[in-house]
Image: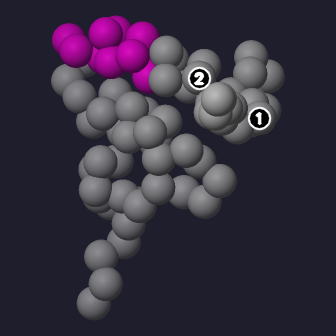
Amino acid sequence: MKADQFSLPYLQRPCPKGVVPEVWKAFAECADCSSSERAGKWLAYLEVHRKYYDKDGNRLPVQTEQLKIF
């Protein structure tokens, strides 16, 4: 019988479709940590989240570096 994914800790759950894996990992670490660690982990999650999403929760355009060839 297959285990229900919702009974697993967040770190063991698959990343949901449409979510950046780095953001999911930061969220899962925060959700699975102890209450004494949660404030620090939440701030770390917000920092990662802001790299990929705007303040309204919309995904930012992918930023790529341009190589300059001389």
Residue 45 position within the rendered picture, expressed as x and y whole percent measured from the top left: 44, 22
Query: What residue lies at 59% left-to-right and 23% top-to-bottom?
Result: 51
Instruction: Identify whether 60 is placed above or below 47.
Output: below
17 vs 9, left or right, is: right
Quarter of the rendering containing residue 56: top right
Residue 46 position within the rendered picture, expressed as x and y whole percent measured from the top left: 51, 17
19 vs 15, left or right, is: right
Q: Quadrant of the N terminus?
A: bottom left
Query: What residue lies at 22% left-to-right and 15% top-to-bottom?
Result: 37
Instruction: Identify whether 4 is placed above or below 39.
Output: below
Residue 61 position within the rendered picture, expressed as x and y whole percent measured from the top left: 77, 35
Instruction: Give the extent of the magenta segment.
Output: 36-45
Quarter of the rendering containing residue 4: bottom left
Amino acid carrying label 1: it is Pro
Numbered badge on residue 2: none
Residue 8 position within the rendered picture, expressed as x and y whole percent measured from the top left: 29, 58
Q: Quadrant of the C terminus?
A: top right
Is residue 31 visible from the viewing direction of this image? no
Is residue 43 visible from the viewing direction of this image? yes
Instruction: From the image, tell me which residue sits under label 1.
Output: 61
Amino acid carrying label 2: it is Lys
Query: What residue lies at 74% left-to-right and 17% top-to-bottom?
Result: 55
Label 1: element kind: loop
Instruction: From the image, tell me which residue sits under label 2.
Output: 51
Label 2: element kind: helix
Q: Magenta region, mostly helix, strand or loop?
A: helix
Instruction: Identify whether 28 is placed above or below 1.
Output: above
Which of the marked residues, 1 or 2, is nearer the chain's N terminus?
A: 2
- Viewer-nearest residue: 66 or 28: 66
Disc 1 to disc 2, C-alpha distance: 10 Å
Do the numbered discs 1 and 2 sit on residues whose CB atoms are within 8 Å? no
